Amino acid sequence: MSSIKAHTALVKQLARELGFDYCGIARAEPLTEDARRLERWLAQGYHGTMSYMERYMDLRIDPRKLVPGARSVITLLMNYYPAQQQRAECYQISKYAYGEDYHRVIKKKLKIFLRGLREQVGEIAGRGFVDSAPVLERAWAVRSGLGWIGKNGNLITPKQGSFLFIATLITDLQLEFDDPFVKDYCGTCRRCIDACPTGAILPDKVIDGSRCISYYTIELRDHMMPTEAAGKTQNWIFGCDICQDVCPWNRFSKPTTQPAFTPLPEILNFTNEEWEQLSEEKFVEIFGRSPLKRAGWKGLKRNIRLVRLSHLSAYE
């Protein structure tokens, strides 16, 4: 067995041992066409107040600028679909935030992954990324053969749907590359488009991020949610899963086996009254290691207040 083949087998083995559900590998090269799409998206203002998306364009385009001499981009997927879900009548939290903050969980695993590679291969350059760095992770997932981009903008895998976290490991280690995923199995389905309350899902797989419920409830933070948007957020107070919940491919979702993503009891059991009465002290105590800390206690209370007001207005 050649060293390249052996190293590739090692990468796939480490991915399994660390609990990743999928692992694909692509050649480290510029993402020219994806960069053009991103530039057009930014020019339309679909990123809203998320100005950080305009920065580091050169790094987003070329992984070799993130890791000099990079040869391979490893994409890893981890299932977070919960075995239990909230009651429909309660304030809703996006499923990815049911448990511990995935950034902490997966970054730790990426460090172990890279250490394991170095122990068996020798000194190599490498950096791991989870969502918060200038990496076009969905584009790399497609190039690595793991799935396609759905009309709702999410990566969809044919065997497990889209409730998956994406992590990227860029390295100068030469590996065998997987064939890109070239098919699109969304077909004529438009359930996600029709279900989106705010009309954020546009034709040609374009998402107006500035109209997404997740944007309103997480990214705006200290900014006031537009009045017309508040009436469309339904029961969502942190994120939104509507476009994923209606996707036919998610009938293949299976409960995660990762203990860190087990739903917090409060997420499942809090009544609306308990959410409304939640103090800042209790918020920090319960959700200090949760993705909910991104919105913060003030942001969460603002979202709850706006959802309540929109419901009261509907009955006037």
Image (cartoon, helix red, strand yellow):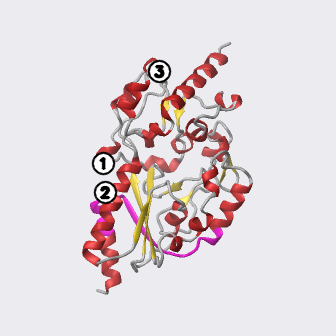
Dots 3 and 2: beta carbons under 8 Å?
no
Q: Is residue 275 above or below residue 85?
A: above
| Element carrying mark 3 | helix
Question: Residue 257 — which label?
Answer: 1
Q: Quadrant of residue 12?
A: bottom left
Tell which of 79 and 169 is nearer to you.
Answer: 169
Disc 2 vs disc 1: Cβ atoms closer than 8 Å? Answer: yes
Q: Which residue is mark 3?
A: 272
| Residue 83 badge | none
Q: Earlier in the sequence, mark 3 or mark 2?
A: 2
**What kind of residue is marked 3?**
Asn
Q: Nearer the viewer, residue 152 or 247?
A: 152
Q: From this view, report whether residue 136 is shown above or below residue 154.
A: below
For the point 63% across and 40% down, the residue is: 196
Q: Which residues are magenta?
A: 12-33
Residue 169 rendering spot, x and y as whole percentages? 42, 66
Residue occupied by mark 2: 19
